Image (cartoon, rainbow, N blue to C red):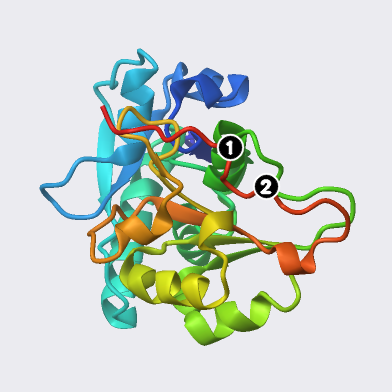
Amino acid sequence: MSVQIGKLFGVSLGPGDPGLITRRAWEVMQSDAHWTYPVRSRSSESYALGIAQRAGLVIPENHSPLLFPMTHDAAKLSFYWLEAAQTVLSVLQAGRDVAFLVEGDASTYSTFGHLARTLKALDASIEIEVIAGVPSFHAAAARLQEPLADVDDMLAIVPAGYGVSMLERLLDDFDTLVLLKVKPILNDIIDLLERKNLLEHSCFIEKSGAPEERIVRDVASLKGEKVNYLSLLIVKNPGRLRGEIARGCRKVVRVEAQ
């Protein structure tokens, strides 16, 4: 008798606060699905797994870390994506569902997309379900009690890695910029914001919702500082706004890491 192939779930856990885990994600993690989760190195911990643990969930006996290294080397990335997909495929072919835990939302700048595409290339018949989650920028805006966009405001959400010249052009067209993955060029971004007189309208948020969360409204104070990879900047652009002047972060209370 043939074994029924398992199903892959992209389980979005939100950016750090376990209270933002959806009922659907919770349901899948409470099932007998085999847990998998991304790690950056063989010795590193999984941020996504940590969210599940803070929610009070116990890591099941059957679980597998999947290595997704921090590199831009296409050949290396392809090797590890294939290795991860083959690991997942072997579990699915044994008839067991797989839950891939991911911080934020699985459809937004997530390792899950690479895993799903590679898995489909190995076996197009595999069933995949993506469970929507709260993205970091939505959680950050809620923590700041500031709207990302209002009425007919223009909003851009971009990885800062596109470079300062691109970000400067976006300021001509958008009322709010959400800059993700700011760590590598944070100093250059601060210089740009200073040149555009936008420092007072900008907020830095690191690990939103996690115990180590940090919110900084004095963005200039971060110059020269090494920040976490899981950080973003929300920039309000008063020159673009129609109506009231953007409040930016001027009324935000600074939250220090515990």
Against 20, is 205 above or below? below
Against 246, is 72 above or below? below
Residue 7 seen anywhere in this rendered image of the structure? no
Q: Quadrant of residue 37?
A: top left
Marks 1,2: beta carbons within 8 A: yes
The label shown at residue 196 is none
Q: Secondary structure at mark 2?
A: loop
Q: Residue at x 39, y 17 (%)?
A: 55
Q: Is residue 50 left or right of residue 215?
A: left
Q: Check disc 1 and report the residue beneath it.
A: 251
Mark 1 and mark 2: span between their CA atoms?
7 Å
The label shown at residue 247 is 2
Residue sitting nearer the eye, 212 or 188: 188
Q: Secondary structure at mark 1?
A: loop
Residue sitting nearer the eye, 118 or 185: 185
Q: Circle 2: is it few (<14), some (14-19), or many (20+) Cα within 10 Å? A: some
